[in-house]
Amino acid sequence: MDNVNLDLLPKDGERLLKELADGNMVITRSKNDFLYILDFDGQFHMFSHTSGAPGGGQRQFPKDEKYTAVVRNLAEISDAVYLAEFDKSMNLYGVMYTAEEGILDLFPGVDRDGDGMVDFGLPSDDDSRNETDE
């Protein structure tokens, strides 16, 4: 796999932890702040970045009860949760950049309430009569 596969995840902490345990990257988003989370070497590795900013941050936390609860709760407090699947031989910073650009293309954030939602509506009988009457 030479690309990054993105998916929108439900805001479910157990699912987030499962995806991390499977070796995937989970990305949480709050407005234009992104948190990239990985689980390896017995630790949670977190990389933060604000879209458009020149830099970001990085922290590691032990995979203990306290920090597992913190990571689980990220799903509920974030605006959205995404899954990034990628070949582990790829450059990690390149994966994060590609994932962020993909998320911003799919869910630009201009209309936060409309991101990822499509509203299908059928005209009512009154609407169709009004159109033919005019």
Image (cartoon, rainbow, N blue to C red):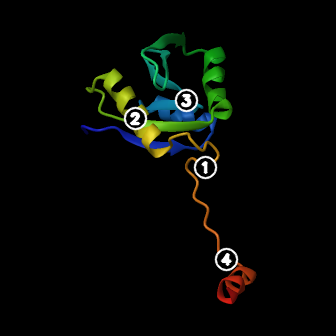
* Front: mark 4 or 2: 4
The residue singled out by tag 3 in the image is 32
Mark 3 residue type: Asn
Task: Indicate the quadrant where residue 95 lies.
Answer: top left
Q: Which is more toward the observer, 18 or 1?
A: 1
Work out how far the residue at label 2 is from the one at label 1, CA to CA, in angstroms. 18 Å
Q: Where is residue 94 in the image (x, y as percent from the top left)?
A: 31, 25
Q: Which mark is residue 123?
A: 4
Quadrant of the snapshot with the N terminus: top left
Query: What residue is at 26 percent from the left and 26 percent from the top?
Result: 89
Percent coordinates x, y for residue 105 in the rendering: 43, 42
Judge left or right: residue 50 versus residue 101. right
Describe residue 51's horizontal placement relative to residue 78 as left or right.
Answer: left
| C-alpha gap between disc 4 and disc 2 | 36 Å
Q: Is mark 3 on a helix, strand or loop?
A: loop
Quarter location, residue 109: top right
Q: Do the residues labelled 2 and 1 touch (CB within 8 Å)?
A: no
Give the labeled residue for mark 1.
114
Q: Hey, what amino acid is under mark 4?
A: Pro
> What is the C-alpha distance between the residues marked 2 and 3?
12 Å
Mark closer to the chain start, 1 or 4: 1
Instruction: Read off the residue under disc 2.
Output: 101
For disc 3, the neighbor class at 10 Å (few under 14, some 14 to 19, many from 20) is: some
